[in-house]
């Protein structure tokens, strides 16, 4: 199955290879690849994870080459979601000295003091690394959410769940970086909080094709639909017409 798109200005997306056994099992259990053949655009939110300078600007501590290539697709999805009456949420990760002090287990994965210092420095509110990447189409009507855990939807990480509930949202389109860390964690928790989760394969990015594909395989297995940007924009357009009709 092709879940790779090259939409956007010169974008070169990850090559996506869903694990064959996962795809076969998924199609058998679901009766097809996708669970969500329809959605209400007014109850659908775009959730954009960690598209901050810390990840997208070379020289920053979390920089990943190629992450910026998904920006055009994220912007296209934001336009399509807004056109259908749905909200766009821009999620920003913060790691401060307070975070490091209270999230002691995370420090085991960033053991070097210099690495901890650089991450906390870059992802503290007000720092250059903390700000959203300049190429993103952020509008005044959009919402910005700050999270302090990898998942934006785990208890205590942010108020994203409350904001989604307040808007009557039942479906989340998960995009951003990294596919296999904060995006996967948010999509998994979203599904377990009873949101319909759809992960957009060419609007997420990781540090390698292998990590990206493994994460999408995990999510497709039991947690989310996995679609391309073009597929999602077409589905949103069809559903807008259905609602209007």
Image: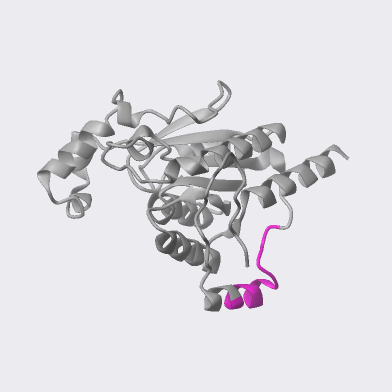
Picture quadrant of residue 240: top right
Of residues 140 and 68, which is closer to you in this image?
68
**Residue sitting at 21 percent across and 54 percent down?**
109
Q: Image point 56% across, 24% down: which residue?
A: 139
Residue 207 at what x, y percent from top left? 37, 53
| Residue 211 rendering spot, x and y as whole percentages | 40, 61
Is residue 44 visible to the viewer in this orientation of the structure? Answer: yes
When asked about the image quadrant of residue 68, the answer is top left
Vertical relation: 33 (above or below) 47: below
**Image check: 18 left or right of 234?**
left
Q: Does the magenta-highlighted stretch encompass residue 99?
A: no
**Residue 226 pos. (x, y %):** 58, 58
Percent coordinates x, y for residue 173 in the rendering: 58, 47
Q: Nearer the viewer, residue 201 or 197?
A: 201
Q: Nearer the viewer, residue 68 or 161?
A: 68
Position above or below: 98 against 28: above
| Image quadrant in which the N terminus is located | bottom right
Residue 28 belongs to the span the image colors magenta: yes
Q: Residue at x 72, y 36 (%)?
A: 84
Q: Nearer the viewer, residue 235 or 222?
A: 235
Residue farthest toward the right in the current orientation of the protein: 245
Q: Which residues are magenta?
A: 24-36
Residue that sits furthest to the top in the current view: 140
């Amino acid at each position: 199955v092709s879940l790779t798109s090259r939409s956007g200005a010169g974008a070169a997306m990850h090559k996506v290879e869903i694990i064959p056994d996962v795809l076969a099992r998924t199609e058998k259990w679901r009766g097809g690849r996708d669970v969500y053949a329809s959605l209400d655009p007014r109850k659908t939110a775009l959730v954009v994870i960690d598209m901050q300078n810390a990840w997208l600007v070379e020289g920053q501590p979390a920089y990943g080459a190629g992450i910026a290539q998904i920006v055009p697709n994220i912007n296209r999805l934001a336009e399509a979601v807004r056109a259908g009456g749905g909200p766009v949420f821009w999620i920003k990760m913060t790691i401060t000295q307070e975070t490091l002090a209270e999230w002691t287990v995370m420090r085991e994965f960033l053991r070097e003091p210099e690495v901890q210092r650089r991450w906390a420095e870059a992802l503290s509110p007000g720092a250059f690394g903390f700000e959203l990447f300049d190429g993103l189409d952020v509008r005044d009507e959009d919402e910005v959410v700050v999270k302090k855990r990898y998942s934006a939807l785990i208890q205590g990480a942010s108020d994203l769940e409350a904001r989604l509930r307040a808007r009557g949202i039942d479906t989340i389109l998960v995009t951003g970086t990294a596919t296999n860390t904060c995006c996967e964690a948010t999509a998994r928790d979203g599904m377990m909080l009873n949101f319909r989760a759809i992960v957009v394969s060419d609007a997420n990015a990781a540090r390698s094709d292998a990590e990206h594909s493994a994460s999408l395989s995990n999510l497709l297995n039991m947690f989310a639909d996995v679609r391309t940007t073009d597929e999602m924009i077409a589905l949103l357009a069809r559903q807008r017409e259905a609602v209007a009709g």
